[in-house]
Image (cartoon, rainbow, N blue to C red):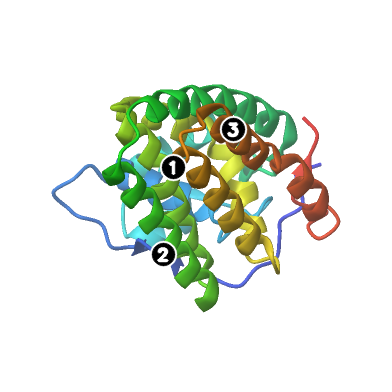
Amino acid sequence: MPPRIAVSTPIETAGRPGGLGRLDRKLPAADQIYRVIRDAIISGQFRPREAMSENRICGMFAVSRSPVRIALTRLAEDGLIDIFPQRGSFVAPIKLQQVREGHFARVALELAVLREAADHWSKSCADVATEAIRRQKRFARDGDAWRFHTADEQFHRSFAVCAGLEGVWTTIQGVKTHLDRVRHLANPVKGHMDKVIAEHEAIIAQLDDGRPDDAVAAMRHHLDSLHATIERLRPLHKDYFVEE
């Protein structure tokens, strides 16, 4: 049997960075469609098991089938779309095995980056990270989960910048794709954003005090809270998660 199609209201825009259908005709259409749909899936605007037909996406972007097929293939390779021959394409559920594997890789990379950042820690590094926390506090007060997420990304990226390892941050972004779906589900939950902010502040406090081992421990605690977050979310979103 084909997967159940999630019922949802029509989505006119994907993510907050831009709306569907607003393609730059000077750039490859497939790349733009891929990025917009990817952001919409990760942010939860396209829900697990929601149908993603070629016709639907062609209509969203006013394009032919060719770039849409390329984008869907890339999304399937990312594990964000499930394609069933003669049945259609559907947003993949959050596959917990992929989340665990991504988490394992992210922890290894981010802790290594943080140790390197600690060796280069300076007032300018602290200022960038602290500014990201300040923005998070503002967006948390406003209940703006999307911008809170972008500030969260700024915070974690700041350590790679401080360490001179921005290329590693690009790798981290790739391995945490499925984790980010969980993070977007969690951010609107009452108290979650405040908890994230407190954990971020604890990491900076240890770095400012010249205690790199404690900073790494605080970062590990922060990243490992993902497991408890999933357990809180599963009863709220029973159809979103699968074990595979």
Residue shown at the point (67%, 61%) measured from the top left: 192
Left or right of 11? Residue 163 is left
State which tag comes first along the sequence, 1 or 2.
Answer: 2
Residue that numbered label 3 is attached to: 214
Name which residue type carries label 1. Asp
State which tag comes first along the sequence, 3 or 2.
Answer: 2
Name which residue type carries label 2. Arg
Indicate whether 2 appears above or below 151: above
Q: Which residue is most to the front? A: 209
Indicate whether 153 appears above or below 15: above
Left or right of 160? Residue 112 is right
Residue 102, quarter of the rendered image? top right
Mark nearer the viewer, 3 or 2? 3
Determine crowd level at label 3: few under 14, some 14-19, many 20+ residues with C-alpha closer than 10 A.
some
Tag 1 secondary structure: helix
Work out whether residue 101 or residue 118 is closer to the camera in this orientation and state it.
118
The answer to whether mark 1 and mark 2 are in CB contact below 8 A is no
Tag 2 secondary structure: helix
**CA gap, disc 1 and disc 2:** 19 Å
Visible residue check, residue 81: no
Quarter of the figure with the N terminus: top right
Residue that numbered label 2 is attached to: 135
Indicate whether 71 appears above or below 43: above
Quarter of the figure with the C terminus: top right
Q: Position of residue 44 (x, y in %)?
A: 59, 57
State which tag comes first along the sequence, 1 or 3.
Answer: 1
Q: Position of residue 97 (x, y in %)?
A: 73, 29
Residue that numbered label 1 is attached to: 208
Q: Which residue is most to the left? A: 26
Q: Position of residue 229 (x, y in %)?
A: 74, 49
Name which residue type carries label 3. Asp
Tag 3 secondary structure: helix
